[in-house]
Amino acid sequence: MLNLSDVLQTNKMISEQKLDIRTITLGLSLLPCLSAGPASLPQAVYDRICKKAENLVRVGEEIEADYGIPIVNKRISVTPVSLILEGADPVAIAKAMDRAAKAVGVNFIGGYSALVHKRMGLCDEKLIRSIPEALCETELVCSSVNVGSTRAGINMDAVALMGKVIREAALRSRDSDGLACAKLVVFCNAVEDNPFMAGAFHGVGEGDEAINVGVSGPGVVAQALKAVRGQPFDVVAEEIKRTAFKITRMGQLVAREASRRLDLPFGIVDLSLAPTPAMGDSVAHILEEMGLERCGIHGTTAALALLNDAVKKGGVMASSHVGGLSGAFIPVSEDIGMIEAARCGALTLDKLEAMTCVCSVGLDMIAVPGDTDESTLSAIIADEAAIGMVNNKTTAVRVIPAVGKGVGEELVFGGLLGQAPVMPVHKGSAKDFIARGGRIPAPIHSLKN
């Protein structure tokens, strides 16, 4: 059983190696709001969020004080909004979510989402087309769209539409360096219990509420690997596994405490290594500690595969419920090592795509030239969705067209979102490919029944 002594073992990790709980996320079903009817739905959404999350921030701060564990973010994820529209104005619901998030004091609220991996319904399409306006009219709302799955294939009509949506969102938010696009994720095989933004939503199989915790600790892993420099990869993997166990154990304690104090069900601990732009908190630096001169050179994909697998193996024994995405994230703008590698040209879009075959998610927080057309954006999404579909894993795209900027310039968001060097894309056109529409069929290994 976990107790305070478990946390005390991690004091050095917290004080010197930037170990933290990245987020406590309250997953909240909005299905009970449907009885309010379309006209009153935004107010019902606001009232439910405020009632259920009123103590979330306070409890998070109390746990921080009691255990000395930094909890960086307190967040909310809700039922995919397209499922509750019923004739209501989606942007009005987004604004209600935003007001509620501010009222309870959380950092972000996710779930302005649609699940269209097979086909788009009328409410799904209505919500998707409203995303640029909704994200530019709100501050804390995050959005996601699931366009494919291993069991359903890839909805290429949705992929084509998302290229247009991302382009429009970038244009609408050009004054903030495309911030709206930083709050929008396109998924294949999206999971229902992800606590991390911008892709978090509360799945329909999750019950009315759940407390999900996301742990982070790239700096701890990088520091641990210094003790095994020059050792074989078997030794490296074992060291990462032991470190991931310690990190996840702390997350389990926080999740249980938050669940008990809020009197809400414990969902999962996501043991992902989520980097920040701060020095000493980088996944790229872990890969370089394994012996790579720079993240992105040949050998990077193999190193990331080892890291991702060892993190999962080490963490799964430390928590009664491991879920979410769980592994290693590679968001370019949020990882100082990735930023440095992209600036010098070692890390390219093509190499990042290869790395997504073996990491937790996908092409994350990547800036592309502002004149990138919508069909190219859709083609990037299609490629990443294909990796997820065939490999039966979650993949995602969070790409930001840098309006008015070109390769070598940078977008600057600040905070955890960091800054993103603009990376080149291939010049050839995929317009005719994307224009075909329809659905790419699911792979044969989807037929498992």
Image: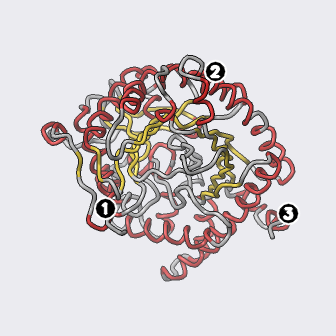
Query: In whole angstroms, how far apart are the C-alphas of marks 1 and 3?
Result: 43 Å
12, 163: nearer the viewer:
163
Give the quadrant of residue 245.
bottom right
Closer to the observer: label 2 or label 3?
A: 2
Give the class, few, some or many, for how many residues have Cα within 10 Å of label 1's Cα (few <14, many ≥20).
some
The residue lying furthest to the left in this view is: 432
380, 394: nearer the viewer:
394
Q: Badge 2 is on which residue?
A: 43
Amino acid bearing label 1: Val
Q: Secondary structure at mark 2?
A: helix
Q: Which label belongs to residue 390?
A: 1
Amino acid bearing label 3: Leu
Above or below for 162 versus 330: above
Q: Is residue 8 left or right of residue 273?
A: right
Give the mark nearest the N terminus, 2 or 3.
3
Q: Badge 3 is on which residue?
A: 4
Amino acid bearing label 2: Gln
Give the mark nearest the N terminus, 1 or 3.
3
